[in-house]
Amino acid sequence: MKQQKQLFENLVLLLIIIILDEDEWAIQEVAIQKKGHIMITLQKQHIGNWILLEYLSSLHVVNEKLNFFERKYNTTFESIESRIKTLDKENFNLWDDYIEWKSYKKAASELISKISEVRSGNFEVA
């Protein structure tokens, strides 16, 4: 029981400091303090940088997949898309690749949008 009490007392306390910013409540910094130890303050921009790195990493992986399909077919997605629409006979392998390629195009577009939002400071920390 004594160990549990000690463990409980040493739990990390998370304090969120909220300030009024441009007529909206926004988290500007997060302070983390362990009982009896130094407090670490993280600015919203630092958290944004971590989020940005995560999105950029994901975008890199997605772009590698997009490049794979462009190399495989030696053409662009738009060209394959128009080719699929005009095929007389179904090509299941091409159709499967097209569906996967299309989902990567959508993922890249969404990631680019999220990256833009983070770079402009338009994100929330929850």
Image (cartoon, rainbow, N blue to C red):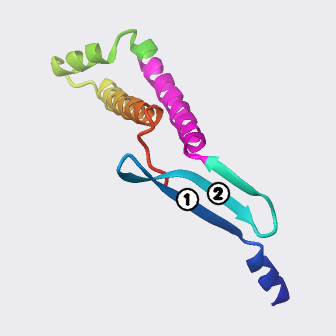
The residue wearing badge 1 is 17
**Residue 66 inside the magenta-drawn segment:** yes
Provide residue 64's location: percent of width, then percent of height.
51, 23
Horizontally, residue 66 falls left or right of residue 98, namely right
SS for dot 2? strand
Q: Amino acid at mark 2?
A: Ala
Q: Quadrant of residue 94?
A: top left
Give the residue furthest to the right: 2
Q: Residues within 10 Å of mark 1 (few under 14, many from 20)?
A: few
Give the residues drawn in magenta, as a range.
43-69
**Is mark 2 in CB contact (under 8 Å) with mark 1?**
yes
Horizontally, residue 31 falls left or right of residue 122, namely right
Horizontally, residue 94 falls left or right of residue 26, namely left
Judge by depth and name the residue closer to the eye, 46 or 115.
46
SS for dot 1? strand
Horizontally, residue 40 falls left or right of residue 97, namely right
Secondary structure mostly seen in magenta is: helix
The residue wearing badge 2 is 31
Q: Residue at x 44, y 15 (%)?
A: 72
Judge by depth and name the residue closer to the eye, 27 or 74.
27
Which quarter of the figure is the N terminus placed in? Answer: bottom right
Q: Earlier in the sequence, mark 2 or mark 1?
A: 1
**Residue 99 inside the magenta-drawn segment:** no
Q: Residue at x 81, y 63 (%)?
A: 37
